[in-house]
Image: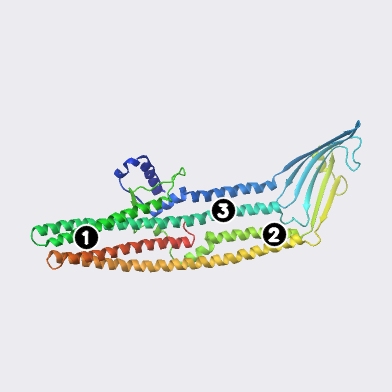
């Protein structure tokens, strides 16, 4: 995080002093700093975080099914001078996790034409409503809350998946930016070498040691490298613009990477790469357990299993039992202390309901099972895809590692031949044409080495991405 803070201060400084950008000291950007910036400020990463907050809000909404509910019934009828009835009945209902509702309420009933089944005067009751069959083990409110919690976990996994993909895209662009800069530096060094060589050739010409055509050939070689340098600088500028697409400031403003920021000098020793596990068995095992794309399917299966349990309830007959223990007045303590439940002062009702054919229940339950089967097949396919992807990137990683070693030796040999040719030239045993030829071959070998190195580093990050570990 210290590196990230330093880079952020640099960014702010560059914005404030943009008119003096060319005069600012050169700063560097490495892969670890880039990942910190993308994680913290990129809109995609922030959107994933918003989805997590939205899923937390859904949990709060789902918990509403367990909120106590207070309701009041008020009724009054007077007709032709006769007070038929006046009824005031407040009630509180407390839902519980096990599908049982606890009820308590009072009633004040008066009038000249009251239903004889009703109790006149002030009374109270404490009761329960119990589902005996359907909705006993699970109901909609429990299912929605369970699913809301899983959706919250799913949102976190989707955030990991989004950041995993985002970081890979950013890092691929980053290494392309590194490649163009390293190529520019190499050609810039060649330009400096050829400028010195041209001066030496001109001195040798004035001393009568070399022909005039040698100065022309040295100048042509220099001009060729200068053209290459201009083109390399253009590519570095453009890849910097592409990398800027992943750079954002804290206030959601896009940030353009200035030319005063370059890749770190020791680009062969990226800190993040040193901490990566590149063991194939470890990567396969880790991906199988924790890969966000696989975890998404696991959570989807959990959600579907809850839905299947809920749909199974539609195959059961509805048998609800409600019991109220009654008491006079508004003193609940007296009501609770009254005698046995089914001896005196009680009221109960039983409601039974069942569709004859259960067509809707059977259809929904079958569909729920098919969705689970479908998701399991998709999970197996995704698991196989990820396994093959990891193995593919691992093969690429191993091959590129070997190629970098071979190309490093190849470049070293070309460089030795160039140095030997220069010695022979100034001893009068060679020509400038041969030196230029050796130099071009050496440059080609070095440029190829840079390309292989950047591909190698890309493959390391791609290997981590394939296992879902870029976080």
Where does label 3 land, which residue?
155
Q: Reply above or below: 29 against 297.
A: above
Mark closest to the chain's N terminus, 1 or 3: 3
Q: Residue at x 30, y 62 (%)?
A: 447
Image position, residue 23 (x, y; %): 29, 43
Instruction: Tell me the distance, in whole angstroms, between the alpha carbons under discs 1 and 2.
Output: 78 Å
Q: Are marks 3 and 2 in contact (CB under 8 Å)?
A: no
Left or right: residue 439 versus residue 263 is: left
Locate residue 216 relative to residue 40 in the image: left or right. left
Q: Which comes sooner in the sequence, label 3 or label 2?
A: 3
Sort mark 3 into few (<14), some (14-19) or many (20+) by Cα contacts within 10 Å. Answer: many
Q: Are marks 1 and 2 in contact (CB under 8 Å)?
A: no
Q: Earlier in the sequence, mark 1 or mark 2?
A: 1
User: Label 1 crowding class (10 Å Cα cut-off): few <14, some 14-19, many 20+?
Assistant: many
Residue 305 percent location from the top left of the image? 66, 60
Q: Position of residue 86 (x, y in %)?
A: 85, 35
Mark 2 Cα within 10 Å, few/some/many (few <14, many 20+)? some
Question: Image point 52% across, 53% down: which residue?
Answer: 159
Q: Which mark is residue 221?
A: 1
Please name the residue that numbered disc 2 is placed on. Answer: 309
Residue at screen point 20% across, 59% down: 220
Total numbered labels:
3
Q: Are marks 1 and 3 in contact (CB under 8 Å)?
A: no
């Amino acid at each position: 995080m210290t590196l990230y803070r330093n880079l952020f201060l640099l960014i702010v400084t560059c914005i404030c002093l943009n008119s003096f950008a060319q005069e600012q000291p050169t700063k560097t950007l490495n892969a670890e700093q880039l990942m910190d910036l993308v994680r913290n400020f990129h809109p995609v990463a922030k959107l994933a975080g918003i989805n997590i907050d939205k899923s937390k809000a859904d949990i709060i909404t789902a918990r509403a099914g367990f909120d106590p509910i207070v309701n009041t019934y008020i009724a009054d009828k007077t007709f032709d001078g006769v007070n038929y009835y006046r009824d005031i009945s407040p009630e509180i209902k407390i839902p519980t996790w096990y599908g049982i509702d606890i009820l308590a309420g009072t009633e004040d009933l008066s009038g000249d034409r009251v239903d004889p089944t009703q109790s006149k005067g002030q009374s109270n009751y404490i009761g329960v409503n119990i589902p005996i069959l359907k909705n006993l083990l699970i109901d909609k409110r429990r299912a929605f809350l369970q699913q809301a919690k899983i959706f919250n976990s799913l949102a976190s996994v989707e955030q990991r998946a989004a950041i995993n993909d985002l970081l890979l895209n950013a890092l691929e662009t980053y290494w392309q930016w590194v490649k163009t800069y390293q190529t520019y530096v190499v050609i810039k060094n060649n330009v400096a070498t050829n400028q010195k060589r041209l001066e030496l050739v001109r001195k040798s010409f004035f001393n009568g040691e070399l022909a005039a055509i040698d100065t022309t050939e040295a100048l042509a070689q220099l001009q060729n490298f200068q053209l290459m340098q201009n083109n390399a600088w253009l590519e570095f500028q453009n890849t910097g613009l592409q990398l800027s697409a992943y750079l954002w400031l804290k206030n959601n403003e896009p940030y353009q990477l200035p030319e005063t920021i370059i890749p770190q000098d020791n680009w062969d020793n990226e800190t993040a790469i040193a901490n990566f596990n590149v063991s194939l068995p470890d990567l396969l095992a880790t991906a199988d357990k924790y890969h966000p794309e696989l975890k998404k399917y696991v959570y989807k299966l959990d959600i579907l299993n809850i839905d299947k349990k809920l749909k199974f309830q539609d195959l059961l007959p509805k048998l609800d039992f409600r019991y109220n223990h009654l008491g006079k007045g508004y003193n609940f303590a007296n009501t609770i202390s009254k005698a046995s439940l089914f001896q005196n002062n009680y009221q109960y009702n039983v409601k039974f309901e069942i569709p004859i054919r259960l067509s809707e229940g059977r259809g929904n339950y079958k569909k729920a099972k098919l969705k689970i089967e479908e998701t399991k097949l998709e999970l197996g396919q995704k698991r196989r895809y990820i396994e093959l992807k990891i193995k593919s990137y691992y093969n690429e990683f191993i091959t590129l590692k070997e190629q970098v070693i071979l190309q490093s030796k190849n470049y070293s040999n070309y460089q030795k031949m160039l140095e030997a040719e220069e010695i022979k030239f100034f001893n009068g045993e060679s020509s400038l044409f041969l030196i230029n030829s050796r130099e071009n071959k050496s440059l080609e070998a070095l440029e190829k080495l840079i390309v292989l190195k950047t591909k190698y580093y890309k493959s390391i990050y791609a290997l981590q991405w394939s296992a879902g570990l870029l976080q």
